[in-house]
Image: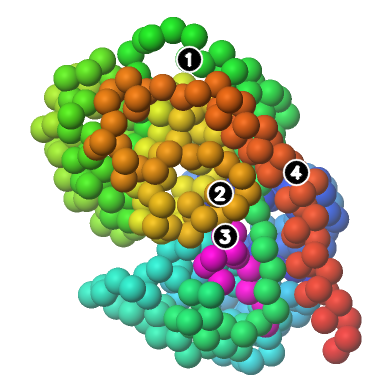
């Protein structure tokens, strides 16, 4: 049995569905975020059926530790806090059967000072125990050398991709249809900036790059529904800055969470998306934007840029925004759009994604059988 440790994100429900539709769900269990409802423990957004993966409550510590001990393998989907890793790091054999799926923020925090005790303790645990983790997986190949340099990881390496709402029945087709129809008229330009209320979005710098467009016919949408602990202060700073530059009528802060399909529809309504993130981040958002025919700006000094460039995507360099006229900024050539939409359809094919996970699961279960 494989234990998945996965917090509640936009990937959770789709990852759970991938396991149960492409694999034998009874061979997997999930430890994930939960909510209290009428004082009863209940998983969020995971509609279980008979034979599907169990969802366990990590707050039941004796049972949780028993599962960690007895399972064949552990997949940690991101390593952002010590709450789970502190238990897994107790025994070397538990570390050896663990795969750390690097999400980006869990390694780039190495370069940032923090005063929070939890962050410091998590960093201490990673520095001390990461070399003993048996398997390492990345979403962007260029993150692996950084993990080796900063955390001295030496486990067997894999490249993975996550399912997103694009793979839900009918979603890709709807987004592609909307994307193909874009650009046929000159309407108010809808701009998406960033994916969350985290400082690695570099909202302030991105807003400065677009200052010359302040009087143009546009609406700026700011997804700010979540972030790291105490993100609300940063969220208000971003909103204030955006309003100062563009005016309140042109700024739409998005502060309420949406389910995956609603969020996909929201992104698909955009014309231009600017992700000025200074690290690997927002790749689910980017995939949805590309499928929807949204013109995409990324900064060219990130591992993400290299990842997409190597796969043949033709994206815009966000550092060039301040050099462009508004017409240049809003114009997305039909050839580029068609090429990018075709490539994202290829790279988000559910068979390709499941094959990558199958390689990891086979290796981990094979190692368990040899013991």
166 lies left or right of 49:
left
Percent of width and height locating residue 156: 70, 79
The correct choice, above or below, for 209 with respect to 306 in the image is: above
Going by the image, does 339 lie left or right of 249? Answer: right
The image quadrant that residue 178 belongs to is: top right
Q: Left of 220 or right of it: where is 90? A: right
| Among numbered discs 1 and 3, the one appearing first in the sequence | 3
- The 10 Å Cα crowd at callout 3, few under 14, some 14 to 19, many 20 or more, is many
Who comes first in sequence, dot 1 or dot 2? Answer: 1
Give me the residue at 85% from left, 55% from top: 24
- Is residue 256 among the parts visible in the rendering? no
Q: Secondary structure at mark 1?
A: loop
Q: Position of residue 365 (x, y in %)?
A: 83, 74
Relative to residue 366, is residue 286 depicted above or below? above
User: Cα distance, mark 1 to mark 3?
Assistant: 31 Å
Q: Secondary structure at mark 3?
A: loop
Q: Circle 1 sits on which residue?
A: 183
SS type, badge 4: helix
- Residue 107 falls within the magenta-colored stretch: no
Instruction: Give the distance between the C-alpha atoms of the residues marked 1 and 2, in whole angstroms.
Output: 23 Å
At label 2, counting other C-alpha atoms closer than 10 Å, the crowd grade (few under 14, some 14-19, many 20 or more) is: some
> Which region shows up in magenta?
134-144
Q: CA distance from mark 4 to mark 2?
A: 18 Å
**Which residue was labeled with disc 2?**
308
Looking at marks 3 and 2 on the same chain, the residue that comes earlier in the sequence is marked by: 3
Which is in the foreground here, disc 1 or disc 4?
Answer: 1
Tell me where residue 207 sits by quadrant: top left
Residue that carries the numbered disc 3 in the rendered image: 140
């Amino acid at each position: 049995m494989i234990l998945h440790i996965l917090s509640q994100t936009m990937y959770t429900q789709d990852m759970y569905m991938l396991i149960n539709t492409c694999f034998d769900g009874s061979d997997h269990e999930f430890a994930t975020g939960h909510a209290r409802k009428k004082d009863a423990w209940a998983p969020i957004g995971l509609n279980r059926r008979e034979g599907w993966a169990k969802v366990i409550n990590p707050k039941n510590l004796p049972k949780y530790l028993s599962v960690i001990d007895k399972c064949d393998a552990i997949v940690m989907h991101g390593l952002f806090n010590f709450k789970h890793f502190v238990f897994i790091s107790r025994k070397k054999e538990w570390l050896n059967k663990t795969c750390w799926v690097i999400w980006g923020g869990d390694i780039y925090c190495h370069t940032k000072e923090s005063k929070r005790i939890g962050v410091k303790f998590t960093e201490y645990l990673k520095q001390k125990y990461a070399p003993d983790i048996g398997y390492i997986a990345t979403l962007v190949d260029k993150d692996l050398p950084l993990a080796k340099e900063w955390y001295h990881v030496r486990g067997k390496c894999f490249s993975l991709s996550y399912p997103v709402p694009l793979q839900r029945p009918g979603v890709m087709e709807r987004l592609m249809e909307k994307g193909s129809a874009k650009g046929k008229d000159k309407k108010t330009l809808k701009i998406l900036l960033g994916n969350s209320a985290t400082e690695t979005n570099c909202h302030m710098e991105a807003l400065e790059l677009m200052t010359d467009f302040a009087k143009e016919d546009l609406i700026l949408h700011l997804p700010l529904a979540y972030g790291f602990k105490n993100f609300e202060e940063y969220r208000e700073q971003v909103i204030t800055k955006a309003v100062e530059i563009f005016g309140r009528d042109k700024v739409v802060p998005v502060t309420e969470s949406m389910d995956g399909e609603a969020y996909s529809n929201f992104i698909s309504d955009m014309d231009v998306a600017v992700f000025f993130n200074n690290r690997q981040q927002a790749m689910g958002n980017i995939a949805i934007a590309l499928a929807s025919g949204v013109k995409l700006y990324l900064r060219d000094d990130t591992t993400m840029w290299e990842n997409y460039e190597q796969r043949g995507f033709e994206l815009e360099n966000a550092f060039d925004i301040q050099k462009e006229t508004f017409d240049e900024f809003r114009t997305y050539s039909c050839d580029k759009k068609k090429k990018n939409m075709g490539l994202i359809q290829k790279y988000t094919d559910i068979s390709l994604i499941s094959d990558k996970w199958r390689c990891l699961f086979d290796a981990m279960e094979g190692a368990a059988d040899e013991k």
